[in-house]
């Protein structure tokens, strides 16, 4: 698989990630920012923040006439008379009955399948190769190619790793079968589809991150822009220094160009849409109808009408040759990330993706219903943009109509593809095993990181209240990082922290009576992730049950086989993605062997885990005992040492005989000889002595790191005070 072909150059600093999710994810979990529609086969492709590209079967638009016999002339049916004197309407067969249709058992839209190889947000995609290939771009720094078959047997073809930062946008030149990609790394690359996606050009000149891209059908021009606020025009045939068009005052978020490369439209975070004359490199008209940033544009095939949307949630229709005359088609419920016309010629509807997970299709017919004679509220679909340049006296900025005062032409979409709730808040419990979440539907749930699954639903309850219910007074070092930007939980393991969580089997909930046996959460997690990987299975068989590392990780869970598992560079750039259940397959196992980090090999093949951390502290008599000259000696022990062990030592060694306190205490703690010979059962030690930290009485079952975290709460070494109980 090409995704790991250059892994050797990444060095040893690598991380592991896995995603906690359902086996089937048929609905988007977060924002939808990329869409493509295959009108020939009635297929919609959608992608966004949850990293998954989904395929939908969408019914073709059909002409449905509402004709009533009362409209017929009595002398027979005069077609010309009927068309001229009666309005009739174009409607979808399924929307002619009215109402919104959502995917379901009897829905016209059906989920077909998913394409899963990206590991971060999908920003853009295009259909090419006569509709047989889908190209996608992602924040994971890659461009990926997919084979799109009509029978839905889609396949992953290739991965292009030319970029080193987020790949933000794509463009397509169908006449020459070339694909263009642009990135935050300021590079623009051109790929030849017919030459096995070979990179044929690298256009340089952009000085900052690129957000928008456009090209002509024959690749005669490429336009790119972004945070520079200016538009650069490249000629890929000559690779000469790009031309510049200035005018925007903020990031340029969308670009479109007409087929002959003479006119271009741009939209930006400055809330403007600008029309450019490419020959003279100047702005010839500006639309200021939007109130906030404009993020997406669509134009019809004749370059006569532009559809725009963005942060203000308005979707506007504007004649290109009369930019001041914008019409408010409808208003979305969230900022709009992507618009997509259902067809370029005479478009009848438009798909909309927003910050929310729902996908909607809106009719482009006015609420007054479109007559056969044309649209009285704007240019007809057959009108063309005049290429004449305005007179020099014409102002470049035109005053737009007040869109805020217009009534939306549509109030209800004709079709909705519902999305699923996404996690928008999370917090790790003190046990460093469970994560509490809240989603966009206000539902609270509890996830078990070690088992990679949801373990409890709390419904619509207070997040903080449920967190307090599940909190324990125990401190365990953090050993993973949680991220929910995809709408699902993603857990990341780093070699600096992954092995820091040593705790007893009792504190881990595996054995209520065993405080002596220690487990390591990070080591358990690695065994779970690599359980099916042949080298891990062989190492476990050779080590035997009595091996120290095997004992420390023996309580690991078998993860769901559908769990996505990612090996990435230290900066998060992915190297390889597979499902946990596929790690035992020959091809995947070999590929995984090429990228697995050394610290994973040490743990699961060589049975090497770091030892327990030591913690220095001081032991002093409590001030209430009025000590004459309290001796402050520095001691050291494992951070998991329980308070009752310290109490036992004080009772047997300090109170009965103060000689040799420091030497004896230090020696025994360093070698984990926890004073088995006591004159009183350790379960009763709390009846003889009390321990304090910052005037807080300590529970005997606490360990030293919990005391330091919850009661000491300051820098410097821990101070513990003992106080005998008078009988």
Image: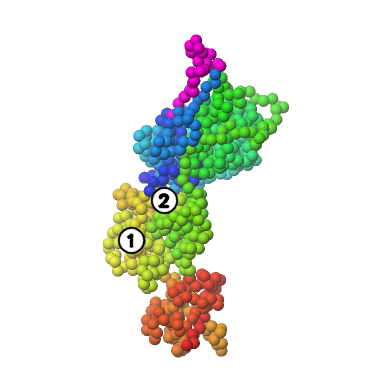
Question: Where residue 603 appears, x then y in whole percent?
Answer: 36, 62
Quadrant of the rendering where the N terminus is positioned: top left
Q: Secondary structure at mark 2?
A: loop
For label 2, the residue is 21
For label 1, the residue is 605
2 vs 1, front mark: 2
Question: Where residue 305 appears, x then y in whole percent?
Answer: 57, 28
Residue 139 position (above or below residue 174):
below
Q: Main secondary structure of the magenta part?
A: loop
Q: Is residue 521 left or right of residue 235?
A: left
Q: Nearer the viewer, residue 272 or 186?
A: 272
Q: Which residues are magenta?
A: 60-85
Q: Is residue 23 left or right of residue 727?
A: left
Going from the N terminus, do you reach mark 2 or mark 1 first?
2
Q: Is residue 129 magenta?
A: no
Q: Is residue 74 magenta?
A: yes
Q: Is residue 276 left or right of residue 423?
A: right
In the picture, the disc for residue 219 is none
Residue at 41% from the left image edge and 68% from the top image edge: 507
Q: Nearer the viewer, residue 455 or 317?
A: 455
Judged from this view, the residue extending furthest toward the right is 393
Report crowding for label 1: few under 14, some 14 to 19, many 20 or more residues within 10 A (C-alpha). some
Q: What is the C-alpha distance between the residues marked 2 and 1? A: 28 Å
Question: Where residue 635 appears, x then y in whole percent?
Answer: 48, 79
Regarding residue 519, the answer to whether it shows in the image is no
Residue at 36% from the left image edge and 55% from the top image edge: 559
């Amino acid at each position: 698989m090409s995704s790991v072909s250059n892994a050797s150059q990444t060095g040893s600093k690598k991380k592991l990630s896995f995603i906690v999710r359902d086996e089937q994810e048929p609905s988007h979990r977060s924002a939808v920012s990329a869409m493509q529609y295959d009108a020939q086969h009635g297929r919609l492709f959608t992608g966004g923040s949850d990293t998954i590209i989904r395929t939908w079967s969408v019914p073709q638009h059909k002409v449905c006439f509402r004709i009533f016999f009362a409209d017929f002339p009595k002398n027979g049916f005069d077609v010309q008379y009927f068309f001229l004197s009666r309005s009739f309407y174009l409607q979808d067969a399924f929307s002619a009955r009215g109402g919104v249709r959502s995917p379901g058992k009897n829905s016209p839209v059906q989920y077909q399948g998913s394409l899963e190889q990206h590991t971060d947000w999908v920003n853009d995609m295009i259909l090419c190769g006569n509709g047989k290939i889908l190209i996608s771009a992602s924040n994971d720094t890659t461009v990926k190619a997919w084979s799109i078959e009509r029978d839905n047997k889609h396949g992953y073809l290739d991965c292009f790793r030319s970029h080193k930062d987020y790949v933000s946008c794509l463009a397509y030149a169908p006449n020459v079968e070339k694909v263009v990609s642009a990135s935050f790394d300021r590079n623009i690359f051109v790929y030849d589809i017919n030459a096995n996606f070979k990179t044929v050009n690298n256009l340089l000149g952009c000085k900052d991150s690129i957000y928008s891209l456009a090209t002509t059908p024959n690749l005669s021009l490429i336009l790119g822009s972004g945070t520079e606020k200016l538009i650069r025009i490249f000629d890929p045939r000559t690779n000469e220094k790009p031309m510049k068009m200035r005018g925007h005052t903020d990031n340029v978020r969308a670009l479109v160009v007409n087929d002959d490369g003479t006119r271009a439209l741009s939209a930006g975070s400055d809330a403007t849409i600008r029309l450019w004359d490419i020959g003279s490199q100047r702005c010839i008209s500006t639309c200021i109808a939007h109130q906030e940033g404009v993020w997406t544009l669509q134009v019809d095939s004749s370059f006569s009408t532009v559809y725009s949307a963005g942060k203000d949630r308005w979707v506007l229709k504007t004649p290109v040759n009369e930019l001041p005359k914008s019409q408010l088609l409808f208003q979305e419920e969230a900022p709009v990330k992507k618009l997509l016309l259902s067809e370029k010629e005479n478009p009848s509807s438009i798909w909309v993706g927003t910050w929310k997970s729902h996908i909607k299709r809106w009719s482009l017919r006015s609420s007054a219903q479109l007559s056969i004679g044309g649209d009285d509220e704007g240019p007809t679909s057959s009108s063309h943009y005049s290429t004449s340049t305005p007179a020099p006296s014409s102002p470049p900025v035109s005053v737009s109509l007040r869109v805020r005062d217009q009534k939306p032409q549509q109030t209800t979409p004709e079709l909705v593809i519902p999305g699923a709730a996404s996690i928008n808040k999370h917090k790790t419990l003190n046990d460093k095993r469970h994560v509490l979440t809240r989603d966009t539907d206000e539902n609270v749930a509890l996830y078990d990181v070690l088992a990679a699954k949801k373990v409890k639903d709390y419904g619509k309850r207070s997040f903080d209240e449920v967190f307090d219910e599940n909190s324990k007074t125990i401190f365990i070092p953090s050993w993973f990082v949680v991220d929910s930007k995809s709408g699902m939980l993603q857990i990341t393991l780093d070699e600096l922290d992954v092995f820091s969580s040593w705790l007893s089997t009792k504190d881990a909930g595996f054995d209520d009576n065993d405080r002596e046996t220690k487990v390591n959460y990070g080591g358990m997690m690695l065994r779970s992730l690599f359980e099916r990987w042949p080298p891990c299975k062989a190492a476990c068989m050779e080590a035997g049950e009595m091996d120290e590392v095997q004992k420390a990780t023996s309580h690991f869970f078998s993860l769901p086989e559908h769990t996505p598992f990612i090996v990435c560079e230290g900066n998060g750039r992915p190297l390889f993605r597979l499902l946990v259940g596929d790690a035992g397959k020959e091809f995947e196992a070999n590929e995984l062997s090429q990228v697995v980090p050394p610290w994973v090999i040490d743990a699961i093949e060589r049975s090497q885990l770091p030892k327990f951390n030591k913690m220095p502290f001081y032991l002093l008599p409590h001030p209430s005992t009025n000590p004459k000259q309290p001796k402050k000696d520095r001691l050291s022990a494992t951070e998991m040492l329980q308070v009752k062990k310290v109490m036992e030592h004080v009772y047997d060694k300090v109170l009965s005989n103060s000689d040799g306190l420091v030497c004896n205490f230090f020696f025994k703690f360093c070698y984990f000889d926890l004073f088995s010979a006591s004159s009183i059962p350790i379960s009763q030690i709390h009846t003889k002595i009390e321990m304090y930290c910052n005037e807080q009485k300590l529970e005997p079952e606490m360990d030293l790191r919990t005391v330091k975290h919850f009661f000491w709460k300051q820098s410097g070494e821990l101070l513990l005070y003992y106080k005998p109980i008078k009988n």
